[in-house]
Image (tube, rainbow, N blue to C red):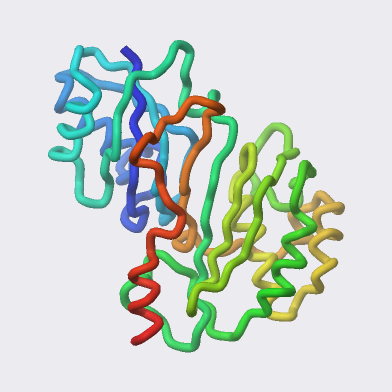
Amino acid sequence: MRLILTLEYDGTSFHGWQVQPGLRTVQGVLESALERMMGESVRIHGSGRTDAGVHALGQVAHFDSPRDIPPRSVAMGLNTLLPRDVRAKGCLEAPEGFHARFSATGKRYRYTILNRSAPTALLRNAVWHIRAPLDVPAMREGASHLLGRKDFAAFRSSGDEGTTVRNVRILTIEREFDLLVLSFEADGFLKHMVRNITGALVEVGRGRLGQRKIEDILRSQSRQNAPKKAPPQGLTLVGVSYGEFDVYGEDRPVGNVNKTLENIIHFQ
């Protein structure tokens, strides 16, 4: 029986998603917990890899269960075995042919920037702290050139292969007190694409890069023409889409989960 897990994790202490010898990874701790539960080794497949330091509210993974355990019991049991920085939010039986990666039709990411002079104690592992004021309208204008189906080769990091064309459906920038929240939705993302785009838009906000320069960088299809990427800790995988099939149900992730903490840091 193929089961689907929806997962939430704090990526601070993980060396990314994928299993790596001698390193602590999300896939590694999940497979270790599943082996204890099932009594044999189990391979788990994620919707995609998240880098070291990157978080998830709605990562999706599947595995083929060697035992007939009700999905709800699998999720509850895993949470007694997993470390505190990763949790199974839900589990359900997969439809025929489902694959967490290859069946995905879209993904949503959020990148959070703390834009004030003082750093934060509470959100230090979840934001990119930028002291200088950022010009949000200019960043929005720059972001508008990235919407739609385009070739994002200029925003792809080395080691990523295959087509570089992606359809960016949503790219919004909202200010919430001292935080800037960049929300991305696309049919898929290239390696470091969100972090690379965020790094470029921040340069626009700092006044170091003209708004129209984003379009020039995109047309160049050269990573060498784009600014350096944003750090990992501000990035969160919010959710994964599978067409009409809903993997979340009542556990649907919400992109604005830090509202309470945002209020706290604003009044510090």
State the image coordinates of residue 87 (x, y, percent, origin top left). 26, 43
User: Would you say 14 lies left or right of 96 here?
Assistant: left
Q: Looking at the rendering, which quadrant does residue 256 occupy? A: bottom left
Q: Which residue is drawn at 43% across and 15% down?
A: 95
In this view, the residue farthest toward the front is 250
Q: Does 9 appear above or below 80?
A: below
**Residue 227, located in which quarter of the rendered image?**
bottom right
**Does residue 159 appear in this view?**
no
- Residue at position x 27%, y 38% in the image: 88
- What x and y, as percent, mark residue 209? 77, 74
Report the residue at 56% width, 73% height from top: 175
Regarding residue 215, the answer to whether it shows in the image is yes
Q: Please state which of residues 219 and 99 is positioned toward the viewer in this rendering.
A: 99
What is the x, y in percent for residue 65?
27, 16
Q: Is residue 233 above or below residue 238?
A: below
Along the horizontal axis of the image, is 202 left or right of 108?
right
**Residue 71, image quadrant:** top left
Left or right placement of residue 67 versus residue 210 in this view: left
Q: Which of 134 and 248 is in front in this view?
A: 248
Could you tell me residue 246's position as x and y percent? Answer: 45, 30
- Residue shown at the point (47%, 33%) measured from the top left: 47
